Every structure is written in C-alpha cells, then in structure tokens.
Image (tube, rainbow, N blue to C red):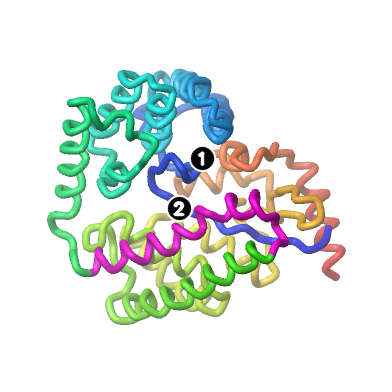
Amino acid sequence: MKNILILVLLIIFSSCKNGEKNEENIVEKTPTSEERAKYAELKSQAWKLYENENYLESAKKYSEAFTTLGNKGNTSDRYNAACSWALANQIDSSFVQLFRIAEKGNYKNYAHITTDSDLSRLHSDKRWNEVLDLVKSNKEKAEEDLDKPLVAILDTIYQEDQGLRRQINEVEEKYGRDSDEMKAHWKTINEKDSINLIKIQKILDERGWLGQDIIGGQGNSTLFLVIQHSQIEIQEKYLPMMREAVKKNNARPSSLALLEDRVSLRTGKRQIYGSQIGRNQESGEFYVSPIENPEKVDERRAEVGLGTLQEYISNWNITWDVEKHKEMTAKFEAEKK
C-alpha cells in the first residue's frame, strides 16, 4: 500500500451542503446496533441521492432512516431532510422537519438557515418566519451567558476552517485530485490554518480550554478543530490540556478520541477509536487506518459517546471487516519496516 493519505475528520454543524457526519444523536431510547447500522446506511443513501440531485428520493430515504429508530433521528439529518423536501417542492414536509428540530431547541444555527439557498422555496410561506423566530430564540438562549466578543472571533475562525474544507470534494471532482487547482486549494487551507492556529494558541495559553458555558458549542468545537488540523508538535502540546478539559466537562470525550487517534497514528502507533480514514492515492480507495485491538473498537467508541465503527465508516462506503482490517494492517506495517 503506497502513498497513504490520512484524512482528518471534520466536526460540522447542520448544513445541507456539507454532508453531515455528526455522530451525536437525539434519540430518547438506546437503539440496537442493528438499528444504528441500518440508520447509517439509509442516511448515507439519502445523502448520495441529494448529491445526485434526486431530491424526492433523498427525502423519502431520510424518512425511511428515521422510521428505523421509531421516527427519531439526528438533528443534522432532519435538517438535511428538510432541504431535500424543499428542493423537491414538498413544502409541507420540509416544514415538518424544520419545526421538529427548532421547537425542541436543538437547532440554533441562525446564520446558516437564513442563507441556505436549498430552503429558498420556503421563504414566501408564512411558516418560514415562524421557524426563523424559533431558531433565533434558540441561538439567543444558548448565548445569553457567553463571552460574545470571543464567540465572534471563534465563529470567524470556524467559518474559515470549515469553509474551504467544504469545497475540497467540489474542487477535486472538477479538476482532479492531483491538479494544480487542488494543490492551490490545499495551499490556501494551510495558510488559513497557520493564521488561525496563532489565534487559538493565544486563547488556550491565556485562558485554557474553555467550555461551552463560555464560548458555546461551536466555539468549543473550534478549539478542537484548529488543533486537530495542526502539526504533530502542536497536537502533542495541547493533548494533555484537552484531556483535563474532558475531565472538567469543558471538551467532548468524542472529540478527544479523534485527537488521540490522530496523535497515535502520527507518532507511529495504531489508533484507538478508528476515527482516522486513509486513502490510497493510487486507487483512490478509502480504508480504516490501523487500529489497536480492532475486535474491541466498538466498545471503546461507546465509552466516549461514538456510534459503531460501521455506522461511521459507511460515510466513505467502507464495510467493516475485522479480519480484512488485520490483514491490511499487517501488510501496511510490514511495508513501513
């Protein structure tokens, strides 16, 4: 296996255009592993239908996914379903999804929903302003006690960090993975990352790893994202700080798991939680990078609030096979010697 590229997992908030991969569910009862796997499979199919502009079938597939969990589901998936329904000109069905996540207080991304062109067909309906009022109220309630100047800084950093990464697939599909345009795009990403890292380090060094109670959920994720995208020396420096932040409930255990995996792989060890996906540059095929004790990976993922590995890797159309993974790992590690 040659020219292996490790992909960074992105934590992205609700957006139709971003291919949601948020692993945090709002289901009330604990679903079985079979139900979770089916849900993941169906929502992956729904997303591909959306990307192929088959919006009606995409929306129906999302509904099928929700049915597998007793009509419960992920907030971001319901938002994406609303987009598909809207683009299919099924306005009532779109509003059903939006009201569900807005009325429960789960959806707070006012800046995104007001600019998302996928929902433009809803704007002339009187229910649109009702949804916006709910989302705005959710946002304001969540930000009442926050450090608003710092939240604004982190919001800008988040948009810069995620904005360019959201365009990666589009640039690759249009120009090719090894094109000059793709190289230029990555150059821009790296330049932005360097600038944002300076700002994040200043915050961490002066104030520590701040929790959601001070900088909100997105701001808290921004701290992690910028460190996750930094050089190994930076990651190793702030890994102990993030471990302490998790103990104080100032950072998500699931995010820490991703950073632990990234550092492990970059220092020559196997990952623990299976969050890092590799890609063979010759074939373009995706695969799960080497995992320590892969038979127990789902147990470890459950401990930090992550879903099953199969649910996660279905986003890359990978099927989890422990024995094949062990064979791949043995071959990969033999080539490194």
Determine the residue positioned at 46% across, 43% down.
17
Determine the residue positioned at 40% across, 80% down.
198
Q: Which mark is residue 11?
A: 2
**Picture coordinates of residue 30, whole percent (x, y):** 42, 29
Relative to 115, say whether 255 is above or below.
Answer: below
Q: Secondary structure at mark 2?
A: loop
**Picture coordinates of residue 144, whole percent (x, y):** 13, 55
> Any magenta on residue 267?
no
| Horizontal side of residue 122 vs 277, given as left or right | left
Q: Which mark is residue 307?
A: 1
Q: Main secondary structure of the magenta part?
A: helix
**Picture coordinates of residue 334, whole percent (x, y):** 86, 63
- Between disc 1 and disc 2, the foreground one is 2
Question: Label 2 crowding class (10 Å Cα cut-off): few <14, some 14-19, many 20+?
Answer: some
* Magenta stretch bounds: 150-179
Relative to 193, say whether 316 is above or below.
Answer: above
Quadrant showing the N terminus: bottom right
**Residue 68 visible from this viewpoint:** no
Q: Which mark is residue 199?
A: none
Going by the numbered disc 2, the residue's amino acid type is Ile
Going by the numbered disc 1, the residue's amino acid type is Gly
Quadrant showing the C terminus: bottom right
Relative to 16, say whether 179 is above or below.
Answer: below
| Horizontal side of residue 164 vs 71, given as left or right | right
Q: Quadrant of residue 116?
A: top left
Q: CA distance from mark 1 to mark 2?
A: 14 Å
Q: Earlier in the sequence, mark 1 or mark 2?
A: 2
Q: Secondary structure at mark 1?
A: loop
**Picture coordinates of residue 297, whole percent (x, y):** 61, 46
Disc 1 and disc 2 in contact, CB within 8 angstroms: no
> Any magenta on residue 162?
yes
| Horizontal side of residue 226 vs 6, given as left or right | left
